[in-house]
Amino acid sequence: MSIQEIADRLVELCKAGDFATAHAELYADDCVSIEPDGAPVKEVKGKEGLAQKGKQFDEMMEVHGFTVSAPIVADEFFSIVLGMDATFKPTGQRSNSSEIAVYEVKDGKIVKEEFFFRPQGSGM
């Protein structure tokens, strides 16, 4: 698949809420996922790390709505904007947030994803 095809497929799967298929189909076994400072988990490695991060997210958040932009592709990278309406389960606080996600592709697989947003309560 081309980088554009990978980006389009990721957007399709994210819009459907099918993150497990996205990870299985599009990510390299040794991929890296990086969150900003202040996020509960800063970095995970590998598909198992992605699965654990997803499980932690599901335990902490109740998602009411999710949006995904069209991808922007440049060289070996693409970016999307993710929006979310969710409630933080431990506090019951509901909020709307958005973030920019940047993905790096090598040999037909996503090898790195990095998310850019201000974690709530980060004081930034």
Image (cartoon, rainbow, N blue to C red):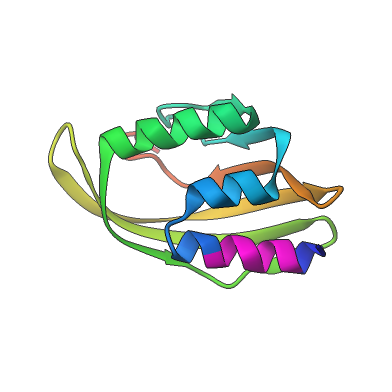
Q: Answer with left or right where residue 99 lies relative to residue 66.
A: right
Q: Position of residue 124 (x, y in %)?
A: 40, 38
Residue found at the very far bottom of the displayed protein = 70
Whether 123 is among the magenta residues is no
Residue at screen point 39% across, 33% down: 55
Residue at screen point 46% across, 26% down: 41
User: Would residue 37 be visible to someone looking at this image?
Assistant: no
Q: Answer with left or right where residue 69 lies relative to residue 72.
A: left
User: Would residue 60 be visible to someone looking at this image?
Assistant: yes
Residue at screen point 59% across, 45% down: 23
Residue at screen point 52% across, 27% down: 42
Q: Answer with left or right where residue 19 lies relative to residue 5.
A: left
Q: How many marks?
A: 0
88, above or below 25, in the image: above
Q: Answer with left or right where residue 99 lies relative to residue 94.
A: right
Q: Position of residue 110 (x, y in %)?
A: 72, 47
Q: Position of residue 45 (x, y in %)?
A: 63, 27
Q: Main secondary structure of the magenta part?
A: helix
Q: Position of residue 65 (x, y in %)?
A: 30, 62
119, above or below 81, in the image: above
Q: Quadrant of residue 46?
A: top right
30, above or below 111, in the image: above
The N terminus lies in quadrant:
bottom right
The range drawn in magenta is 5-12
9, above or below 24, in the image: below
Q: Quadrant of residue 24?
A: top right
| 13 or 91: nearer the viewer | 13
